[in-house]
Image (spheres, grey):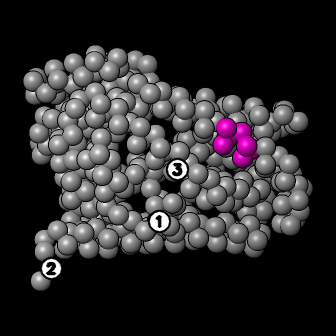
């Protein structure tokens, strides 16, 4: 007879298998759509007609991106709906109503469109004005923009999806602030957010840069974990700052961005000729850029995940060293694995491609031997 723990383990395996299978299908589907969109001449046709219909060239790029973005959303909707809504409800990980889910989709779509428009517009402007070193200038701009986005996310983007609540537990708040002082991490404030309105999963984070730095606790975590468990979870988050992991990740992502744009710079002429295009300046070549990003992302993801897993392990070790809460860490990992339906011991291939944190069993084994 199957025990409750075996049943939950199998359930987590089924959830993970479907989630990662859908992620793989989504990437293949995106590449297929991009190649078809370009190969069938639809990108060139759209760019041409927009340039003829719109008298002011300033609006051509925003309209092109809006049409392509909307078309992709419609074509990808069945996969997106199953992955983000049906699957989460099927495994009892979400209690969000379909109307609220659609509202979040609209908000996320508008935000994504604005971000993409800024980046693409900057790309074409720099490409036209700095022909020989555009790859370096656009890389620096994208890096700068990502830092601005990280600073604004806690105060602009998160409040669009979750409601900040005044932290009512003064005892826990004081422990968090004391922990920050102990780890020499400056905390501007502690907030609780209403995760439970959308998902049953638990999470905590230390987000923001400079004067937007703050601790965020999901109510699904705050209400179900004891003080020691919450303390060691947040000690892990603070450890990332204490060990300068944010700076290391910024440097890593900056290097990856520069390498990618340089690869585009030295190889795009050959690639463009296959599709009958002469220059990246042509708006119709935008899908080519997206193909570069998608393929390069697939190649780099295992490497970036490996680096991330190393940093996460170091953060776990420092959290245990600072707090001494070995039992609380293990119990927190056990609870998180059950609440989030985490695959505790994934296949090495799945771990290699998808896991940016060490699997739960590895984290527990590390804590037991600490």
Q: Which residue is mark 2?
A: 2
Q: Measuring from the top left, give residue 152's x and y in whole percent.
A: 44, 29
Q: Which residue is mark 3?
A: 306
Which label's residue is closer to the chain start, 3 or 2? 2
Q: Is residue 301 magenta?
A: no
The reply to whether residue 1 is visible in this rendering is: yes
Position of 93 relative to 157 (above/below): below
Q: Magenta residues?
A: 255-261
Query: Between marks 3 and 2, how big is the CA–CA gap?
Result: 34 Å
In the drawing, does residue 31 fall left or right of residue 364? Answer: right
Q: Is residue 259 magenta?
A: yes
> Farthest residue in the front direction?
369
Secondary structure type for disc 2:
loop
Query: Which is nearer the eye, 330 or 219?
Result: 330
Position of 62 relative to 172 (above/below): below
Q: Which mark is residue 348?
A: 1
């Amino acid at each position: 007879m199957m025990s409750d723990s075996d049943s939950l383990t199998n359930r987590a395996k089924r959830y993970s298998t479907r989630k990662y299978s859908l992620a793989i299908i989504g990437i293949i589907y995106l590449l297929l759509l991009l190649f078809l969109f370009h190969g069938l001449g639809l990108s060139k046709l759209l760019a041409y007609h927009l340039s003829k219909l719109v008298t002011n060239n300033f609006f051509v790029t925003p309209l092109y991106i809006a049409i392509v973005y909307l078309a992709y959303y419609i074509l990808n909707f069945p996969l997106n709906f199953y992955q983000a809504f049906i699957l989460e409800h099927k495994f009892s990980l979400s209690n969000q109503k379909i109307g609220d889910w659609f509202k979040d989709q609209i908000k996320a779509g508008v935000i994504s469109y604005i971000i993409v428009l800024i980046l693409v517009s900057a790309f074409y402007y720099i490409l036209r004005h700095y022909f020989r070193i555009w790859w370096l200038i656009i890389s620096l701009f994208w890096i700068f923009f990502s830092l601005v986005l990280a600073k604004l996310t806690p105060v602009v983007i998160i409040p669009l999806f979750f409601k900040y609540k005044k932290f009512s537990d003064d005892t826990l708040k004081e422990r968090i602030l004391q922990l920050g002082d102990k780890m020499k991490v400056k905390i501007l404030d502690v907030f609780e957010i209403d995760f439970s309105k959308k998902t049953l999963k638990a999470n905590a984070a230390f987000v923001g840069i400079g004067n937007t730095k703050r601790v965020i606790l999901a109510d699904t975590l705050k209400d179900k974990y004891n003080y020691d468990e919450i303390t060691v979870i947040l000690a892990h988050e603070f450890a990332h700052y204490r060990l300068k992991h944010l700076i290391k990740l910024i440097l890593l992502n900056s290097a990856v961005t520069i390498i990618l744009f340089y690869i585009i710079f030295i190889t795009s002429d050959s690639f463009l000729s296959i599709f009958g295009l002469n220059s990246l300046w042509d708006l119709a070549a935008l899908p080519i850029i997206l193909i570069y990003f998608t393929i390069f992302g697939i190649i780099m993801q295992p490497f970036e995940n490996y680096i991330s897993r190393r940093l996460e392990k170091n953060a776990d070790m420092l959290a245990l060293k600072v707090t001494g809460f070995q039992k609380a860490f293990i119990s927190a990992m056990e609870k998180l694995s059950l609440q989030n339906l985490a695959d505790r011991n994934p296949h090495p291939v799945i771990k290699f491609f998808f896991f940016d944190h060490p699997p739960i069993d590895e984290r527990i084994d590390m804590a037991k031997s600490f």
